[in-house]
Image: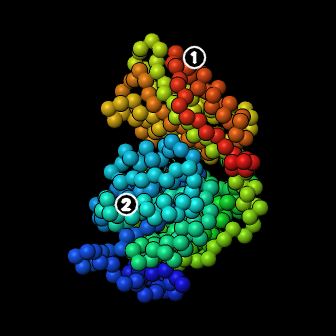
Amino acid sequence: MPYDTFNTYGGAAAMHEDTATTKAATLRNKAGEAIEKIRFMVMSGFLGAGKTTTMIALGEHMNKTYGKVGIIANDLGANLVDTNLTQTSGCTVEEIASGCICYQMDNTIDKIRRLRDRDGCIFVMSDIPGLGVGALDHTYHRLADDCADWIDLSPFTVLVDPERIKMLLPEGEGEEDIHLPEELKYLMQLQLEEADLIVLHKIDLISDAEVERDVNFLKEACPDIPVMKISALTGEGIPELAEYLESYGTSLKNFSVRDNEKFQEAEKTLTWYNRRMFVKQLDDEKIDMNEVIDDLLEEIRMGLIERKRNVPHLKTFATAGAGDFNKCSLLGIDYDVEHTQEFLRNHKKMSMIINARAVCESRPFARIVDDAVDMICDKYHLDAQIFFTECFNMGDEGR
Ligand SMILES: Nc1nc2c(ncn2[C@@H]2O[C@H](COP(=O)(O)OP(=O)(O)OP(=O)(O)O)[C@@H](O)[C@H]2O)c(=O)[nH]1
Ligand SMILES: [Mg+2]
């Protein structure tokens, strides 16, 4: 049965007409007072599409206009950049690491409950790993079955990066080679099909004509799914998106991966790499650690180019005391490093996390990172202590 849906969003309500059902009985606390249901939503989208940035922008906006928002940072593996980055915002954060929320639903339900009871959140959002498909089934259907009396589900939202749409556009329109394997197209198509709502993101990076072209493409490719456009960086479209997510529910469609083999082929192209390390300047000198991080990322980029491999998202988060931090992203060998935040001062040491999702076999990728770390140690006379490294390909036997 379709999940409870709010149809208060003007003309677009008709789009969701068939999804409205009766609401569950009102929850009451010990004193007999009515308790509002909490809202939950999943933010999906390909690696680097901007899920974390958008959740933070939505959270900060909705904290002021709607009520307290909780964010669950979710990814495979441990030591997540996204958790650390989200903690620097004004949002309340929980983490579900070492696997997708889909396979940790009891844990996810506990976190949502804790965010409500301990932190007073009335809206919780979680992302899923950037290759994720299937959360509608695993997460939304489970919550609809088991928690409909205290959780309302907002639209299952899929973000799309205009750079990645180039892979899906008809020949001649997006022909620029972004050096990602063909197999990943299928993964992106599945993500779009799964959506209740598709959001074209990073519109600050493209012209109005390109926005129109991409929106039209998405509407044609997914005719029954509403399309919005935003830039989390400039804030454009964030209030409208927030209002939509607060007002609408999910159509709770039945979606499953049609061709599991093809999906696994796409998964196998990706390696997950997470490292935590501590870097110290051996002459006790304060240096510009921003430069060190830039050199590290550039060396990894060059290593990948040399081996004809790529990294759809490589992100680093470094701290050096007194709240000073650096957060960088590299969205592929064809792009420059993006600095979400740079250190404001020089430092003698820093703690650093590296998370990479690479189109490269796991051992060669680990070597590329090790070589890059050796290079910065030589160049800046540093010692690097490695506390944690994990590196696995999605297709590795025995994982
Ligand atoms: N220009 C521009 N860049 C953005 C925008 N939103 C995010 N980015 C950048 O895109 C990069 C990736 O953003 P994230 O929010 O980490 O993307 P993500 O989808 O959470 O990435 P994964 O969790 O690794 O899959 C970062 O460098 C962001 O600063 C935007 O609206 N405009
Ligand atoms: Mg993220």
Sequence-first tag of 1 and 2? 2
Disc 1 vs disc 2: Cβ atoms closer than 8 Å?
A: no
Vertical comparison of 131 with 287: above or below = below
Foreground residue among 253 and 200: 253
Label 1 neighbour load within 10 Å: few <14, some 14-19, many 20+? few
Report which residue position mark 2 lands on: 114
Q: Amino acid at mark 1?
A: Asp
Task: Determine whether, in the image, residue 187 is placed left or right of residue 65.
Answer: right
Regarding mark 2 in the picture, which secondary structure is present there? helix
Residue 70 sits in quarter? bottom left
Q: Tell which residue pokes out farthest to the top in this image.
A: 283
**Residue 344: x and y, percent?**
36, 31
Residue drawn at x 39%, y 23% is: 347
**Residue 21: x and y, percent?**
46, 86
Would residue 172 be visible to someone looking at this image? no
Report which residue position mark 1 lands on: 378
| Label annotation for residue 130 | none
* Front label number (1 vs 2): 2
Judging from the image, the colouring scheme is rainbow
**Residue 30: x and y, percent?**
25, 74
Residue drawn at x 57%, y 62% is: 102
Vertical comparison of 332 with 113: above or below = above
Would residue 382 be visible to someone looking at this image? yes
